[in-house]
Image (cartoon, rainbow, N blue to C red):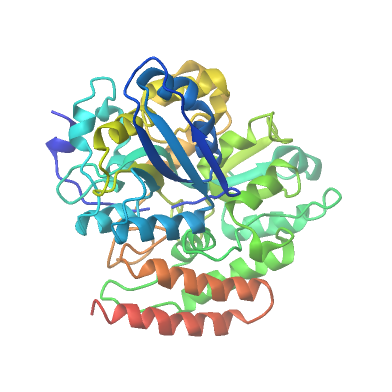
Amino acid sequence: MARARRSARVGLAAVAAGSLLVACSEVGGWGSGGGGETINVLMVGNPQMQDIAKLTEDSFTKDTGIKVNFTILPENELRDKVTQDIATQAGQYDVATIGAYEVPIWHKNSWLHELSSYAEGDSGFDENDLLEPMVQSLSGADGNLYALPFYGESSFLMYNREVMAEKGIDVPRRPTWHQVADIAAEVDGARPGMKGICLRGLPGWGELGAPLTTMVNTFGGTWFTKDWKAQVNSKEFREATSFYVDLVRKHGEVGAPQAGFTECLKAMSQGKVAMWYDATSAAGSLEDPKTSKVAGKVGYAHAPVEKTNSSGWLWAWAWAMPKTTKKADAASKFMLWASGKDYEKLVGEKLGWSRVPAGKRASTYAVFEYRKASAAFGDIALKSIKQAHPTSPGVQQRPTVGIQFVAVPEFQDLGTKVTEEISAAIAGRTSVDQALENGQKLAEEVARNYQ
């Protein structure tokens, strides 16, 4: 019996985060597999999704005859679009990428198809090979999967080894945030136009909110206490936010208030910044010489800490099937293929093994070609995923699960509004104190729903 049937799971949650430019892609052709159905897939515009849009026609469609229309959007736009479509039961999409935040909430609202039965019915999918943190984060309270992981991630520090060597800096394997800030100051301007570090400044609960909240956690703060008292203007939350804002303003990337995952990925891969704290899934792109000027020159360290032993987030971008779809069979075939071992092999052989959507299967880390391609980052990425603590990410008990978010429906709006205030502080349009006072009022409104 599949693991999802053996034990009930608490729906753990975790982000990350990432976005690329808007792109729409249609792939098709009837192929040799017959069928002739067409499904609509809505997905976030991260590099791994761009890859699958390129590979689907000549592999999945060719084999099954199922045509796939992709709509690819930046993260913030994707979240708005998928929430609107699924929550209103519009039924425009047969498959959508969602994350660990949405799964337990949307399952509770009965918006998603249960997927464990499809996984169990596919002898080649091997559900037991999925990493347990990914399974937990994408399961409902009934123990069934409600999304299939495309790739999983935690967060870590990425740095330019050449620049560090030139400056005689040895980056600790497990640095503190104060050590990172000192290094950022030393390498700022190490090369013409180079900044010390890239940290997201783009508003959004899954953009700026993701790295900031991990910093809040390890500085001793939290959005809410166990009994739902808002803590946005607390000493610890204020200290972490001030540290983040000061670091970005002094040594961060150009245009920080508009910089999200995509912009930081570009800055790091083009040698415009010396360090970057973000998703472990970014490493594959940084190590691809076709797109990165720093391939083979990047070092990796665990997520910086202060008062906790670890601070990395936990997230999975995953395929979900809205209950409104009338093409469940075709949609499930696409999802099982896209999350399967054969797809990882296809990416490795066609695009390069560093670009495999990893972080979801134990077997991936036993593949010789992947281990070789990910030698610089694979082990630390896997350890970061396994060390993430969605039920206890800070120094105090929490009212819900989640590392870089709070797993309640209201957090999507709350996190976005508060990060808009903090992004304004990065831009110099307001102070951190004012931003957090405004945020505290919004958090208190949410807390009243649960007290």
Screen quadrant of the N terminus: top left
Residue 212 screen position, x and y as percent: 52, 63
Q: Is residue 387 visible?
A: no
**Closest to the observer, 397 or 192:** 192
In front here: 231 or 337?
Answer: 337
Q: Residue at x 27, y 56 (%)?
A: 106
Q: Residue 223: horizontal and vertical position, in percent? A: 39, 71
Please tell me whether residue 289 is drawn above or below residue 401 in the rendered image. above
For the question of whether residue 75 can be seen, the reply is: yes
Q: Quadrant of residue 136?
A: top left
Rendered view: 145 above or below 122: below
Looking at the image, residue 64 sits to the left or right of residue 346; the answer is: left
292 displayed left or right of 38: right
For the point 60% across and 66% down, the residue is: 244
Q: Is residue 173 left or right of residue 28?
A: right
* 429 or 165, nearer to the observer: 429
Q: How many marks?
A: 0
Name the residue located 81 percent from the left edge and 41 percent from the top edge. 166
Quadrant into which the C terminus falls: bottom left
Q: Quadrant of residue 355?
A: top right
Q: Where is residue 312 shown, x and y percent of the image?
A: 46, 51
Give the x, y percent position of residue 240: 53, 69
Q: Which residue appears at 50% of the width and 24% of the height?
A: 347
